Image (cartoon, helix red, strand yellow):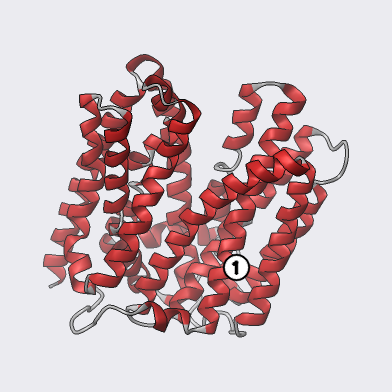
């Protein structure tokens, strides 16, 4: 268990004063924004060629699928090789792949394969970055750095989607893909210049063969503390359901496209406010103490959608839910503290794969159910189910803490 006694919250200045963190932060922002830009450009390109909503949606779904393979089969690269080298290698490879997408008259299947490969490399990149963050930021600076990074991810998604629409409208889809290639190249340059060289983890574990996969899954599932913390992280699909149903939900309430945009933005907005406030104002011990209750609450509040409130009230509900997701800061910090340094990449790969694959699967279930039950009912049901799962996991973790204490 991480000992948080006597640890005081870190300040923003102490985190951003670290040159390496600044490089990791900027590289992550470029990576996220570039990914969203490419996704917008490619979905527009597919729709323009086929006029098929199904193929367009399938293209979007491709962005989730590689996380299963990447998280389970590639994340261990962050433990077997120097993490700085892994990040630079992923970025340079993605630069070439994104540049290849600009090729005129490239077949749609080839474009989708290239998008799959680009997304596949996001898993080892993020696993290496997350593991390296724990080396760069010590003590409570890691928790605040994680909050800043998560906030950046939310902002990068919004900015990437918004900028993607504008860039594609002004320049076309292929120039937007060229810009995406440039973001990966710039990210690689930032990491090379701003992050110092480190050797591969001295305690890196696992055989060279595929046997490490079972070892990685076993690492997080056999350890009761790691398992409970990871399962708290896997609650994302339950409280992110409003994003999956944003368009039909807003249309039911007469909000149209503008209303859908507000629904998309409500949860990330709340998450930005909650994450920064929680990491900056709450002491580490307080974060751990409130982690379970916040996990239950961020899902449970969505149950209010059973009352079928109007759009304005619904936006408040979604923003409050997003604010309460700040518990992920505590779960992430506790998770990294409990994982052996040489296996962080492997552990984060399994955790991230579960979140992404869970989102894709749960969103399909939610979308199917919404056709008969309605978006508001499905959002409420998702929140209630999530709250039940969160309560069970939180209670299990309390038993682990008591037995260890």
Farthest-out residue, top: 372
Instruction: Please indicate whether residue 241 sits to the left or right of residue 293 in the image.
Output: right
Would residue 315 appear left or right of 30 to someone viewing this image? left
Q: Is residue 77 visible?
A: no
Q: Of residues 251 and 271, which is closer to you in this image?
A: 251
Element under label 1?
helix
Give the residue drawn at x 41%, y 72%.
145
Q: Looking at the image, can residue 243 be seen? A: yes
Q: In the rendered view, tell whether residue 164 sits above or below residue 45.
A: below
Foreground residue among 305 and 195: 305
Q: Nearer the viewer, residue 341 or 217?
A: 341
Measured as percent of width and height from the top left, residue 380 is found at 26, 31
| Residue 177 to residue 277: above or below | above
- Residue at (18%, 69%) from the top-left corner? 286
286 sits to left or right of 144: left
- Residue 173 lies in quadrant: top right
**Quadrant position of the C terminus in the picture:** bottom left
Task: Look at mark 1 in the image and give the residue it sits on.
Answer: 27
Residue 149 to residue 232: above or below: below
């Amino acid at each position: 268990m991480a000992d948080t006694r006597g640890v005081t919250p870190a300040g923003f200045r102490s985190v951003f004063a670290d040159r390496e963190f600044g490089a990791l932060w900027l590289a992550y922002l470029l990576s996220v924004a570039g990914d969203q830009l490419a996704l917008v450009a490619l979905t527009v390109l597919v729709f323009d060629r086929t006029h098929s909503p199904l193929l367009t949606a399938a293209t979007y779904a491709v962005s989730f699928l590689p996380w299963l393979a990447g998280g389970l089969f590639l994340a261990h690269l962050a433990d077997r090789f120097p993490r700085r080298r892994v990040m630079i290698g992923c970025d340079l490879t993605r630069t070439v792949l994104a540049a290849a997408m600009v090729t005129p008259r490239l077949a749609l299947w080839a474009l989708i394969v290239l998008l799959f490969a680009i997304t596949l490399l996001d898993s080892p990149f993020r696993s290496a970055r997350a593991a390296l963050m724990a080396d760069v930021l010590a003590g409570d600076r890691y928790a605040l750095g994680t909050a800043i990074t998560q906030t950046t991810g939310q902002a990068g998604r919004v900015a990437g989607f918004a900028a993607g629409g504008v860039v594609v409208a002004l320049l076309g889809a292929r120039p937007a893909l060229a810009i995406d290639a440039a973001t990966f190249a710039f990210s690689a340059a930032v990491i090379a210049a701003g992050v110092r060289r480190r050797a591969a983890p001295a305690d890196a574990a696992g055989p060279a063969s595929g046997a490490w996969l079972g070892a990685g899954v076993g690492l997080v599932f056999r350890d009761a503390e790691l398992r409970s913390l990871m399962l708290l992280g896997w609650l994302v699909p339950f409280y992110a359901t409003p994003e999956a149903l944003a368009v039909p939900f807003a249309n039911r309430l007469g909000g149209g496209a503008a209303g859908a945009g507000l629904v998309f933005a409500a949860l990330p907005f709340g998450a930005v406010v909650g994450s920064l406030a929680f990491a900056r104002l709450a002491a580490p011990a307080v974060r751990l103490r409130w982690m379970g209750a916040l996990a239950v609450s961020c899902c449970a509040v969505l149950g209010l959608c059973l009352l079928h409130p109007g759009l304005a009230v619904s936006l408040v509900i979604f923003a409050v839910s997003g604010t309460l997701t700040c518990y992920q800061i505590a779960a992430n910090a506790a998770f990294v503290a409990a994982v052996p340094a040489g296996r962080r990449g492997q552990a984060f790969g399994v955790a991230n794969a579960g979140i992404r694959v869970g989102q894709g699967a749960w969103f399909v279930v939610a979308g199917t159910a919404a056709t008969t039950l309605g978006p508001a009912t499905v959002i409420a049901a998702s929140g209630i189910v999530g709250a039940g799962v969160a309560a069970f996991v939180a209670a299990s973790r309390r038993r682990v803490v008591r037995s260890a204490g």
